[in-house]
Amino acid sequence: MRIDIITIFPEMIEGFFNHSILKRAQNKGLAEIHLHNLRDWTTDKHRRVDDYPFGGSAGMVMKIEPVDRCITSLKAEREYDDVVFMTPDGEQFNQSMANTMSLAGNLIFLCGHFKGIDYRIREHFITKEISIGDYVLTGGELAAAVVADSIIRIIPGVISDEQSALSDSFQDNLLAPPVYTRPANYNGWEVPEVLLSGHEARIRDWELQQAIERTKALRPDLLDD
Ligand code: ADE
């Protein structure tokens, strides 16, 4: 999978992709992340990416020309499954969207800033609009990093124990059960006895019951589906 991220602050997320599992995914050739500085696609000497809104309301608006140039040049090189705009008024991101998007070959993520982007960009270039939650960030960079992280980690081969990606919270609309490691007794706080029993069927059954109970208590809305 290849993800091209268009942003005015590439440094903000560059480091994020150079660590841990995301770094390993790139080293293994399973994912490519390309950051594009939108200012590189301006033609004026001030490298302007924003301008005043028509109609006189407050705030600045991201200009269409640099975005058009950048997206058009990327599309000339390869086909993209989606051109995604990160925006608080997009479709709320969830695990099922991550699963679907992890099957894509090439994706473009556009990170917004200022008051918004010229609406014609959304009408003519964007094919999917994603929000990572009902709150407003200073820009789309963190949202792009969140979405890229969640889709790259489930590409087969990225996590060595594939089972562990499949047993994540939300993969089956259930929160994950509690997990423990050594020591079995810490300051008198004991690990549930069943986990030490070595009885595979009882352990799996306990985990499922815990997952159901935690989901009922913490996220009952997930069980409605
Ligand atoms: N840009 C600003 N806020 C955002 C959000 N909540 N989700 C996605 N992109 C955003």
Image (cartoon, grey):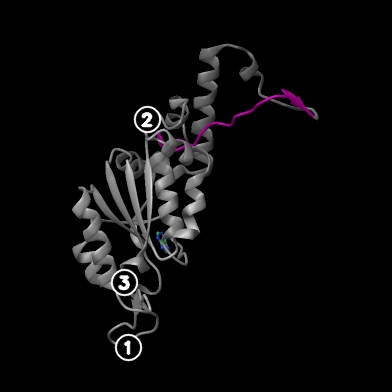
> Residues at badges 3 and 2 in contact (C-beta under 8 Å)?
no
Question: What is the crowding at mark 3: few (fewer than 14 residues within 10 Å), some, or many (at least 20)?
Answer: some
Q: Main SS of the magenta segment?
A: loop
- For label 1, the SS is loop
**The residue stretch that appears in magenta:** 169-186
Point out the tag, 3 or 2, that comes first from the N-terminus: 3
Point out the tag, 1 or 2, that comes first from the N-terminus: 1
Residue under circle 3?
A: 42
Point out the tag, 3 or 1, that comes first from the N-terminus: 3
Any magenta on residue 69? no
Residue at image location 43% in from the left, 56% down from the top: 143
Residue under circle 1?
A: 56
Q: Name the mark on residue 156.
A: 2
- How far across and down, in percent of the image, does residue 171 sit? 41, 35
Relative height, residue 178 to residue 88 (above, below): above
Ligand 1, image quadrant it occupies: bottom left
- For label 2, the SS is loop
- How far across and down, in percent of the image, does residue 202 sit? 54, 15
> Residues at badges 1 and 2 in contact (C-beta under 8 Å)?
no
Disc 1 versus disc 2: nearer the observer: 2
| Frontmost residue, 94 versus 151 | 151
Disc 3 and disc 1: Cα gap in Å? 24 Å
- For label 3, the SS is loop
